[in-house]
Amino acid sequence: MNSSTNTSTIINYSDYYIVCSLSAAFGLLSISVSTLIIAIVQCTKPRLHTVRHLLMSNTCISSTIYCIVQFINYIFLIFLPWIISDVACRWRGYFAYASVTAATYSYLVQAVSRLFFSVYSGRYPWLTTFNAHYVLILTHWLIVLIIPLPALITTDIYFRPGLLCWVPFKHTLHMAYTVVACYVTPIVSIFIIYVVIYRKIRKAKKVPTMILTGTHDKRDLEVLRNIVILLCVYIAGGIPTVLFMITEIDVFYLASIVTFTLTVAIEKICTILLDRDLRPVVKDLIFKTNHIMPYENTCTRMKIGNV
């Protein structure tokens, strides 16, 4: 989420009407699907009352905030162009980067949770409790508020007619910080966690006394794999921005505005398709198949647990 100061990138407002309308449509779809997921998780208990789905709901909230912030930026860009305050622009930039951070780090929180279950649950069982994950979510939102602070502290972001309030390319240090803090750090951390869990599974296969935990480890690896897939879908939305940075061709800048919310919408749909517990519930809701409530007993509760 960066922009050039070159005057050639000040694009005709008719182009903005088209791309922002498309982006807003995809954003509304993302918000709708996110709200649906949160509602299903809250209403389907105890089947979806797990820390995994708690963190999934946290990601949905992050995605919703991201889309709302984009809507606000489009409103200022198209309908309120006379508001030229640099301070107001910096605040819009701050919330834009905060919303990106919220989305990317929400996946990291999910990955850390899988690490707790797969590696540390035996030694520190309290790490798998709901209370521990509430602390994890609180930490996530504190990080969200802290990372984009340079947008407010510095004067690198300022009002430019016809452009969104992002960091200009000429501020190389600020731009590099944004890329590393908002994208590189959570992505690299997630892949490191993936490798750690994978190596633990390989080790478990070689030790007879650890075979019993193999099923849980494979489940953790499957969930983490889904997290990596969803994160890659989300990050794919930044490809047009990278191409614009390299070529400075206006069409890539316009495409980046659309892909930001398009990939979020795709990611939300993939969230439903990849989750083996959520998918049948949504399917039953859409196609209205069987509404027979499952027989719930003590054994059922024990199997559900906090996974």
Image (spheres, rainbow, N blue to C red):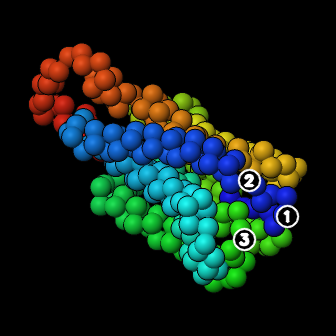
Whether tag 3 and tag 2 are in contact, CB under 8 A, the answer is: no
Q: Residue furthest top?
A: 289
**What residue sits 17% from the left and 31% below the top?**
299
Whether tag 2 and tag 1 are in contact, CB under 8 A, the answer is: no
Are there few (<14), some (14-19), or many (20+) residues within 10 Å of tag 3?
Answer: some
Q: Give the image location of residue 2, x and y in percent.
A: 72, 61
Sequence order check, earlier mark of 3 and 2 = 2
- The dot on residue 6 is 1
Label 2 SS: loop
Q: Give the image location of residue 150, x and y in percent.
A: 64, 77
Q: Which residue is mark 3?
A: 160
Label 1 SS: loop
Q: Amino acid at mark 2?
A: Asn
Q: Say which of 300 and 252 sits in front.
A: 252
Q: What is the spatial separation of the Cα atoms under label 2 and label 1, in whole angstroms? A: 14 Å
In terms of image quadrants, where is residue 232?
Answer: top right
Q: Is residue 257 above or below residue 36?
A: below
Q: Residue furthest right?
A: 247
Q: Give the image location of residue 282, x and y in percent.
A: 32, 28
Q: Is residue 145 above or below residue 251?
A: below
**What residue sits 37% from the left and 48% below the top?**
57
Q: Which residue is mark 2?
A: 12
Sequence order check, earlier mark of 1 and 3 = 1
**What residue sits 50% from the left and 52% below the top?**
67
Q: Amino acid at mark 3?
A: Arg
Q: Amino acid at mark 1?
A: Asn
Pair 3/2: label in front: 2
Are there few (<14), some (14-19), or many (20+) residues within 10 Å of tag 2?
Answer: few
Q: Give the image location of residue 83, x and y in percent.
A: 59, 74
Q: What is the spatial separation of the Cα atoms under label 1 and label 3, in whole angstroms? A: 11 Å
Q: Say which of 129 and 243 sits in front.
A: 243
- Quarter in which the N terminus is drawn: bottom right
